[in-house]
């Protein structure tokens, strides 16, 4: 007795087929098993191992083939819709879902593109046939109408480099770029002929201190400061004689200061000094402009010009350099000399040979060091300037699977302004397009991405981070 049977083909939407688990009988059709997409009308036949996303459609199957629109080779950035067909790397693909701005190729985006036909293996070349007899040349026909321009083909392999063209006119100078990493020093060239002797250069830095010599015999301690009660007036002209202490160190020609107070003083040159009697003869020179003319004074402080201790007032602190506070008073200056010889300005704890707590200005800044490669000579570099107080960090990194995260020091978020940061990238050994996706100062990190990532590809690059400091006032560029 005949038995009735019903045959049903497995069916589902294209989206559900793609989402099915990759196991036999679900997302992988058994060998010879049919699968039907109810929203596209397309059919696939399984082979027992290929996933639905990469399994080719049956050519000519379904009613959707009548609606297929052939769009030529796939082009990045083009808008595609359902049933658009494209070619890519020798195979053809069908658009499953609308793709308004295609950025991923069909092979990298199987959820959007399904395979229509896969490029087959090239067949063996047949045997060349026998050349036929050349026919009589026919009459040349009328030139036909030019056909419509065909779709653009896939880009061919790069051709050989052409002959270099004539050099064009020099363009305007571009904006100066960020200073690159210093290259390796080249081989030293042959020594040129000796040039004419140049002008004498500036005196070099003082050499290292030599070994201490043998201590000599103790001499007499020089002494110049003294006082006198001799009656004399402040005036220029004739020599003046003073009676001072014996045993001083005055010599003929020395310049001395004869001081009464801040308004009455004069300078003079030693004519003679009797070390035994204390008789000092001097020729007056400069006199104070406020001196009382004709007045006789009997209380003199005498010392070498520029040195006066008697009659000075004021208070100070050890290790500070003094500064005049009035005509006879001294007080502390902002300059402090620590016990280890380091000098601080507005600080008593300098951490460098010369340290300023506050702002510091200069016409130019440079470093001057012994030459690192030559036994003789020095190396002088000037500093790059900018219209802001900033920081700069540099480094080398690598992308993995299209992404790289650069970790900045933890203090960066407390040091710089988030809105005034910039990142510059330089490729190393590749020509791929890299871009900065995000600068997250709060988390102290920078995210770099590849425009067209390839799975497993690693790309090296150098990075340069600059930012404006927020811990100090903004620089006034044109005060």
Image: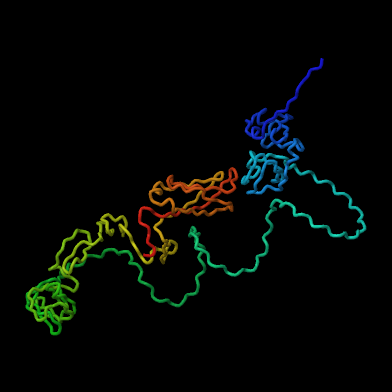
Q: Position of residue 436 (x, y in %)?
A: 51, 50
Determine the residue positioned at 49% across, 74% down: 193
**In which quadrant of the rendered view does residue 81 lie?**
top right
> Up-down: is 400 above or below 475?
above
Q: Position of residue 1 (x, y in %)?
A: 82, 14
Residue 153 makes an appearance in the image: yes
**In which quadrant of the rendered view does residue 293 lie?**
bottom left
**In which quadrant of the rendered view does residue 237 lie?**
bottom left
The mark tally for this picture is 0
Q: Position of residue 215 (x, y in %)?
A: 22, 65
> Up-down: is 333 above or below 242?
above
Determine the residue positioned at 50% across, 54% down: 424
> Up-down: is 455 above or below 194?
above
Determine the residue positioned at 67% across, 60% down: 161
- Along the line of sight, the residue nearer the viewer: 443 or 43: 43
Horizontal side of 361 relative to 319 (left or right) equals right
Horizontal side of 54 relative to 291 (left or right) equals right
Horizontal side of 15 relative to 359 (left or right) equals right
Residue 368 makes an appearance in the image: no
- Along the line of sight, the residue nearer the viewer: 275 or 119: 119
> Up-down: is 312 above or below 418?
below
- Along the line of sight, the residue nearer the viewer: 271 or 239: 239
Q: Position of residue 179 (x, y in %)?
A: 48, 60
- Along the line of sight, the residue nearer the viewer: 238 or 277: 238
The extreme bottom residue here reads 238
Quarter of the image containing the C terminus? Answer: bottom left
| Colour mapping | rainbow
């Amino acid at each position: 007795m005949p038995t009735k049977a019903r045959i049903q083909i497995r069916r589902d939407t294209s989206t559900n087929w793609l989402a099915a688990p990759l196991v036999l009988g679900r997302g992988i059709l058994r060998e010879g098993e049919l699968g039907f997409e109810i929203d596209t009308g397309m059919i696939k036949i399984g082979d027992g191992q290929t996933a639905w996303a990469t399994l080719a459609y049956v050519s000519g199957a379904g009613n959707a083939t009548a609606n297929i629109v052939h769009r030529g080779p796939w082009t990045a950035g083009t808008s595609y819709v359902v049933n658009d067909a494209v070619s890519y790397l020798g195979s053809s693909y069908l658009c499953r879902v609308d793709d308004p701005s295609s950025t991923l190729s069909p092979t990298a985006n199987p959820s959007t593109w399904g395979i229509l036909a896969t490029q087959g293996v090239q067949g063996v070349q047949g045997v060349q046939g026998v050349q036929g007899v050349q026919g009589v040349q026919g009459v040349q026909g009328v030139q036909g109408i030019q056909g419509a321009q065909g779709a653009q083909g896939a880009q061919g392999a790069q051709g050989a480099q052409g002959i270099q063209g004539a050099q064009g006119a020099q363009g305007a100078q571009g904006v100066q770029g960020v200073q690159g990493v210093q290259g390796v020093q080249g081989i030293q060239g042959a020594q040129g002929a000796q040039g004419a002797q140049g002008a004498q250069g500036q005196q070099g830095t003082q050499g290292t201190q030599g070994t201490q010599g043998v201590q000599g015999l103790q001499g007499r301690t020089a002494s110049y400061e003294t006082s006198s009660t001799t009656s004399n007036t402040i005036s220029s002209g004739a020599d003046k004689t003073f009676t001072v202490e014996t045993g001083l160190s005055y010599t003929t020609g020395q310049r001395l200061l004869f001081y009464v107070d801040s308004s009455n003083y004069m300078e003079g040159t030693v004519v003679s000094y009797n070390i035994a009697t204390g008789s000092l003869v001097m020729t007056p020179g400069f006199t104070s402009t406020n001196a009382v003319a004709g007045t006789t004074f009997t209380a003199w402080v005498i010392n070498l010009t520029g040195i006066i201790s008697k009659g000075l007032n004021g208070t100070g602190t050890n290790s500070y350099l003094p500064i005049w506070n009035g005509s006879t008073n001294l007080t502390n200056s902002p300059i402090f000399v620590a016990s280890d010889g380091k000098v601080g300005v507005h600080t008593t704890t300098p951490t460098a040979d010369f340290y300023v707590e506050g702002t510091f200005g200069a016409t130019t800044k440079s470093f001057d060091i012994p030459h690192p490669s030559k036994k003789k000579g020095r190396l002088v570099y000037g500093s790059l300037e900018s219209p802001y107080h900033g920081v700069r960090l540099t480094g080398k990194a690598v992308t993995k699977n299209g992404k790289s995260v650069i970790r900045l020091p933890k203090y960066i978020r407390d040091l710089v302004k988030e809105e005034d940061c910039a990142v510059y990238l330089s490729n190393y050994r590749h020509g791929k397009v890299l871009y900065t996706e995000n600068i997250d100062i709060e988390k102290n990190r920078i995210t770099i991405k590849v425009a067209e990532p390839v799975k497993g590809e690693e790309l090296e690059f150098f990075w340069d981070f600059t930012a404006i400091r927020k811990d100090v006032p903004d620089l006034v560029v044109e005060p």
